[in-house]
Image (tube, rainbow, N blue to C red):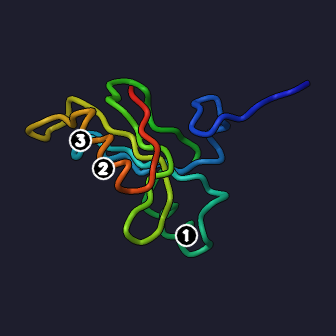
Amino acid sequence: MLTATVHGSSGENPSAFVICERIKRQSICEEYRLSTLSATDRQLITKHCTVGKRCPDENRIGRCIRYTDPDGLVFDKHYYRGSKKKHDWSSSTIEETCIQSGGKYEDG
């Protein structure tokens, strides 16, 4: 049996991920692959975030695959509409931010 794993695919095993979900407050969800985190980062992130889940598809505007934050952490950053923020993210803003952070933008 052949199985292919596509980076960023929602078909990947959720147990390999940890998410920091801030959709209601900031319209974002950060999705980390446990296998790519250092022991220190894994300990910190799993203490404050949810292990074994994926960021939801519902109301997602776009996502940045392999976003790199200023501290060098690499994760998938998902952007949503309909939070308590005054304005939703725009696709062009997400794409620009994503490219500047070394990631690959995906619509929806």
Q: Position of residue 48 (x, y in %)?
A: 43, 61
Q: Which residue is mark 2?
A: 97
Q: Earlier in the sequence, mark 1 or mark 2?
A: 1
Q: Secondary structure at mark 3?
A: helix
Tell me if mark 1 has few (under 14), some (14-19) or many (20+) residues whose alpha carbon lies within 10 angstroms of its own: few
Q: Is residue 63 left or right of residue 37?
A: left
User: How many marks do you count on the picture?
Assistant: 3
Spatial CA distance of label 1 from label 3 is: 31 Å
Q: Which residue is mark 3?
A: 93
Amino acid type assigned to the residue bearing label 1 in the image: Gln
Residue at image coords 17%, 34%: 88
- The image quadrant where one finds the C terminus is top left
Front residue of 33/51: it is 33
Q: Nearer the viewer, mark 1 or mark 2?
A: 2
Which of 104/82 is in front?
104
- Residue 38: x and y, percent? 61, 71
Q: Is residue 72 above or below residue 24?
A: below
In the rendered image, the vertical position of residue 21 relative to residue 40, given as above or below? above
Residue type (three-letter) at the residue carrying disc 2: Thr
Circles 2 and 3, Cβ within 8 Å, touching? The answer is yes
Q: Is residue 98 above or below residue 84?
A: below
The N terminus sits in image quarter: top right
> Within the image, what quadrant is residue 78 found in?
top left
- Check disc 1 and report its element: helix, strand or loop: helix
